[in-house]
Image: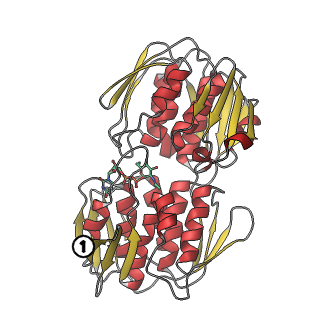
Amino acid sequence: MAKIIIEGGNQLNGSIMVSGAKNAALPIMAGVILSTEPVELTNVPALNDVNTMDRVLQALGTRVENVGGNVYRFDASGQIGDEAPYELVKSMRASFFVMGPLLARLKKARVPLPGGCAIGVRPVNIHLKGFEALGATVSIEGGCAVAVADKLRGSKILLDFPSVGATENLMMAATLAEGLTQIENSAQEPEIVDLANFLNVLGAKITGAGSPTITIEGVEKLGGGRYRVMPDRIEAGTFAIMGAMNGGRVKVDNCDPCHLHALINKLREMGVEVDHDENSISVYASQRLKAVEIKTLPFPGFATDLQAQLMAAMCVANGTSSITETIFENRFMHVSELARMGASIAIHDRTAVIHGVESLKGAPVSATDLRAGAAMVLAGLVAEGRTEISQVFHIDRGYEDLVGRVRKLGASIDRVEDPENEE
Ligand code: UD1
């Protein structure tokens, strides 16, 4: 099992390039099932989660070809199976995105329930209620969500919560439904807009993505096309926080600053100089960061996926910060790991209170989930001495060659294989 080893304290300077967005690429890949003509995607990040979705699509009968670099070709013109394999869905929640496309195309789908994960229970009740509103009969059989319909009919769907995954799954299902669908209280995340843009390139008729009401006029079929996946705003945010913590000048390239308003505002409140143009953000902090308070919220609020990374910065800020996590019920696993490095954090229900310390000390720590793992890298980069991060496979799910890219900024960071600790 690999480890990341960091000798902290180096100042970071230079440019770092952001990859394609994992959370846009995964639903878009699932959406390929809706089309019976060839589809090409570019800017697909090289990540374990993308490989898993690739295997799910192949298991369902889609031809997938990585034609080099970050370009993939898909052909779902053949016979498509209606049953997603348990082993793959179990290993990645986002596999559940195939449910909407399968139901739309085949009028039946059987997909294992993805189950919870380290950060929360994460049910799919909102997805299933939406499929029912579109005319499907939904049941749970042998641990699987099963949906069947004679045909899907457009409908008004009011989401109980603006769930990102449910909005995406329902948008895909409604694309081939008969008539008009309106999804109200829909999620407004940029990845929703990217999925809608992709589906529209293939011939779907979706308007309003990025607002609380999305309207989908069902079409009979989708054609082929080529689409470039948006840049990863969470990766961009992670790098901006990293730069702000390290006292150098870091330019985060190939990102869309409009996706990061909430973070940029908080970084400025912390005393960071933030400049941006259309597709880059530059950060520089000449002094110790100031404490701030944040609450995670659906977009355009502060992203839960950047909470752990900003907490790493708060650990060494001047004063007492707080984070209230409103999206997931158990997303403070990184707190005990940061504490191992000397952070002073108390948790009261869904709020973490962080008393900034002068410095963190390197220690052996675990990446308890994907973004928690990124937070440990950020903490390790500013800590005194050596930090050893285990369970790196979590980081590999969401960051392409993180070590290589951060090293180019001047960090002392390495990845080593640890044969004594094979999984
Ligand atoms: C997506 C992102 C994830 C991010 C999250 C919130 C992907 C692949 N993942 O996850 O990185 O942290 O958005 O921005 O895009 N919920 C229900 N019932 C449902 C669906 C959701 O109760 O049917 C709850 C969840 O348990 C959670 C909250 O709603 O507490 C938000 O979940 P959701 O927006 O659906 O997140 P995901 O799509 O799973």
Q: Position of residue 289 (x, y in %)?
A: 53, 18
Q: Is mark 1 within 8 Å of ligand 1?
A: no
Q: Position of residue 58 (x, y in %)?
A: 58, 75
Q: Is residue 273 above or below residue 17?
A: above
- Pick the front one: 179 or 423: 423
| Rendered image quadrant of residue 67 | bottom right
Residue at x 23%, y 72% (from the top left corner)? 133
Residue at x 56%, y 11% (from the top left corner)? 358
| Rendered image quadrant of residue 183 | bottom left
Let me know if residue 423 appears in the view: yes
- Pick the front one: 358 or 347: 347
Residue at x 75%, y 39% (from the top left corner)? 416
Number of numbered discs present?
A: 1
- Residue 274 left/right relative to 8: left
Crowd rating for badge 1 (residues with CA inside 10 Å; few <14, some 14–19, many 20+) = some
Q: Secondary structure at mark 1?
A: helix
Q: Is residue 292 above or below residue 49?
A: above
Colour scheme of the picture: secondary structure
Q: Position of residue 115 (x, y in %)?
A: 38, 57
- Pick the front one: 207 or 94: 94
Let me know if residue 284 appears in the view: no
The type of residue carrying mark 1 is Glu
Q: Is residue 6 above or below residue 225?
A: above
Residue at x 42%, y 52% (from the top left corner)? 189
Q: Quadrant of the N terminus?
A: top right
Q: Position of residue 167 (x, y in %)?
A: 35, 61
In the current view of this chain or complex, which residue is farthest to the front? 420
Task: Name the residue beneath numbered marker 1.
Answer: 132
- Residue 347 left/right relative to 1: left
